Image (spheres, grey):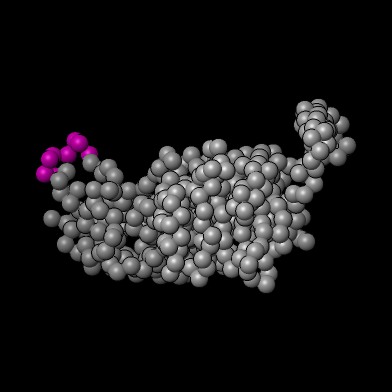
Amino acid sequence: MSHVGEQVEVGHVGSPGVGRFERVVLPHLSAGFTLAMYLTGNKADAEDAVQEAILRAVRYFSTLRDEDARAWFLTIVRRVCFTAYRTDRPQGTDMMSIDAAGPQLVDHRDQPDVAAERMQVQQRVRAAVDQLPPLLRETVVLRELQSCSYAEVAAVTEVPIGTVMSRLSRARARLAVLLNDVVDFGDVA
Amino acid sequence: MKERLDLGRAVREALPAYEASSSLQAWALEEARKFDLQSLPQPEPLSHPLRSRGWRLSHWPIAASLVIAVAAGWGAGVLWPGSRITSVTNATTSELVDAHVRSLLPGHLVDVESSDRHTVKPWFAGKTDIAPTVIDLSDKGFPLLGGRLDYVNGHTAAVLTYRRRGHTINLFIWRTSPDEPSDGSFAVRGYSLLHWSTAGLGLWAVSDAALSELEAFQRAYMQ
């Protein structure tokens, strides 16, 4: 009974309800897809997961209370990834190939050998992140790649902020070991 | 040579952010607009005379077409189908529509592609505990496209896919459970659903075609 009232209320948040889902949720489609790519490790599963997430988001749109639609949508994407797709596949299998990983940031003013070295470092970092356990990997991706606040990461991964911080520091420690020869992590290494 | 990098910078420089493909974006946009159209705020009561009047004016054509449609229905001696459509949003119908929409995405429609019932029917054997009737209804205007398995609201469903003048009809078939909804027709998010039970099986036809098409399909399939 209260659901009906809540739905109506939510429908009237902000100005007209027209185009609300489109305006509120769709801008985060690619953020959701990026998270799904890092969780499922392949494009087909990531697309399926995002499609499923959109269908669920439509169904549960009335549960979106505040304005943090990105965290809300990412939470749904993450749940789909963890329930419907295997995110715990053994390390190294069926992960993204380097070729599929998109353009690299290369500063063309660099000398060729410097650029090549940087590329090599980037490939090593990517491989190392792929090797992280899913819970650490998603925390790194959300925090560092998608620039979520600690509170957002905590909301999306459904753990307390303290857990987010400890996961980040564990991820950082693992990366420091894996990348010991190419990256100096300073305070950690 | 070691580079001094913090984790954030190393990750941002090394990891790509991905962009949803244009087909995924287009599909999501369509779903969003469909949903947003349905959740248009209800017209407010008379306290806002201008808006209220605007609404009434803008709805005149719809009201007029309803009157004409009802009149036409009476004239043709058929009942206005709207009276039998109950707008139900329970879990089963909602999940059926989700499954139907999902099936229309590229590569999701059929697992076994054949208009030959002797190919489709054996395909289900061993994959489900039911043996659905598989018939090609091309001669009645509903060519069989193939079959697939789906999972809907706790049911493993055998799905037969038919075509009707550019519309796709998915026929979901599962073993009926005690909480099976009673037979009837439903309208959910712009899709039509027709449900009937026979011989311990629950059948659900789902399509964006009109309900009358689904009823014609039901007659053809059950003959």
- The residue depicted at 48 percent of the width and 68 percent of the height is B128
- The secondary structure that dominates the magenta segment is loop
State the image coordinates of residue A97 (x, y, percent, origin top left).
Answer: 25, 53
Residue A150 visible at all:
no
Report the residue that reaches farthest toward the right.
B46
- Which of A117/A19 is in front? A19
Where does the image place residue A41, in percent across and percent down from the top left? 34, 58
Q: Is residue B123 magenta?
A: no
Q: Examine the image and state in which quarter residue B212 appears.
A: top right
| Relative vertical location of residue B16 with respect to residue B124 in this rendering, above or below | above
| Image quarter (top left, top right, bottom left or bottom right) of the N terminus of chain B | bottom left
On the question of residue B198 being in view, the answer is: yes
From this view, report whether residue A179 is shown above or below residue A33: below
Q: Residue at x 15, y 46 (%)?
A: A116
Please tell me which residue lies in front, B132 or B50: B132
Q: Which residues are magenta?
A: A107-114
Left or right: B190 as drawn, with respect to B163: right
**Residue B44 screen position, x and y as percent:** 82, 40
* Residue found at the far left of this picture: A113
B97 sits left or right of B211 in the view: left
**Which picture quadrant has residue A93?**
bottom left
Count of numbered marks:
0
Q: Residue at x 81, y 38 (%)?
A: B77
Where is residue B88 shown, x and y percent of the image? Answer: 71, 54
Q: Using the rendered view, name the quadrant where residue B52 is placed.
A: top right
Which residue occupies 69% across, 38% down? A16
Question: Left or right of B31: which side holds A103?
Answer: left
In the image, A157 versus B143, the foreground residue is B143
